[in-house]
Image (cartoon, grey):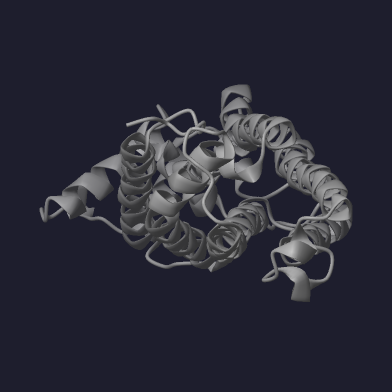
Amino acid sequence: MTDAGQGVSQEGLLAIIWTLAGVSTLLFAGRLAIRSIILKSFHLDDMFGFLAWALMIACMIVSSVEASLSYQYSSIFIGESPMPSPDEFAHMTITIRRFNVASQMLFWTSLYCVKISFMLLYKMVLGVSGLYKGAWLGCMIYIVLCYGTCLIGVFGQCGDSSNLWTYEQCMTPYVASLVTKLIWVDFFCNVSTDLILVILPLPMIWRLHMRTKQKLALSGIFSLAIITIAFETVRTVKLYQLTTYLTNLYSYLELLISVLISMLPSYRFLVSPSAKDREYRRLFWTRVTMRSYHSGSSGYSMDNYERRIGAGESQRDADATKGIQDQPATISAQSRDIV
């Protein structure tokens, strides 16, 4: 089947999005298992992680239902298929716009749930006190405002929101110019908030009393948003050069990769060489395989283990649980270890 100018066939598009959605689902289930076994509790970042995943799945469902009509429309748009009657084409345009408004709402809400999930993770792992508390709060407010700006763009893409469902009012030169501006406004909001996710935790991480390797590992985990910036840049350029109807693949990939990345921090302990993370791995796999687990001569206890590790490892690990130089003790060591 032809790709109708979208760069991939309809079957190929559906295979890609549902394969990545399946991987994200498996990673999300693993994240819940890790949190329930290691932390024995869930936090706000998990709640927003769940919302991001659920809204992403809803977006993919809407996109799958829309796919056939979308490919038919883009085939007409690029001249591969004959132009239908004006009334039929107008009806098709409005129908696709209804699907697009729904998918765009789900897209932006899921994407910003990922961002908020990371912000709440920073608060839990690094703590918020002093100047960092104000910076964190200011960044969180900015992220929420950017989300609102993107939603305004969804409903204001035809000027007045009442024009969304009328063909003539949404096909004027003014609307075409407005859509171009909204593309770059969305790009600025999305990239600037991703840069916040990359930059905000770095000063705190590098002031912690821990080994350089640990600092680099945490910095790498919190810099994963750079990947989504790359996808957002490609998506925006394609939107500017082409049209919304020919860039579905790039939009779906950005969302899917973002949700997938948001699940990865919980898996750090599976590859970390530290003694504490090796102990966490043994605990996790024995719980998964339903075997009893004993550390040393006594039954495993997270509290006992923390005390034993604190006594047996270097003072650096003990200091890392206390916080930042010249600041109150606010870091959750247990949470940081499984980030």
User: Can you see residue 95?
Assistant: yes
Is 109 on the left-hand or right-hand side of 199?
left
Q: Is residue 120 left or right of residue 49?
A: right
Q: Is residue 246 above or below residue 305?
A: above
Residue 296 in the image: state x and y as whole percent: 22, 45
Q: Residue at 77% of width from left, 45% of height from top?
A: 183
Judge by depth and name the residue closer to the eye, 31 or 329.
Answer: 31
Report the front residue among 258 and 203. Answer: 258
Q: Is residue 266 left or right of residue 213?
A: left
Residue 238: x and y, percent? 66, 31
The one nearer the camera, 68 or 276, is 68
Q: Is residue 157 visible?
A: no
Instruction: Residue 237: give x, y in percent of width and height.
Output: 71, 30
Query: Would you identify the image quadrant in which residue 180 lies?
Result: top right
149 in relation to 238, above or below: below
Residue that lies at the very extreme toward the top in this rendered image: 213
Q: Residue at x 42, y 68 (%)?
A: 41
Query: In front: 221, or 180?
Result: 180
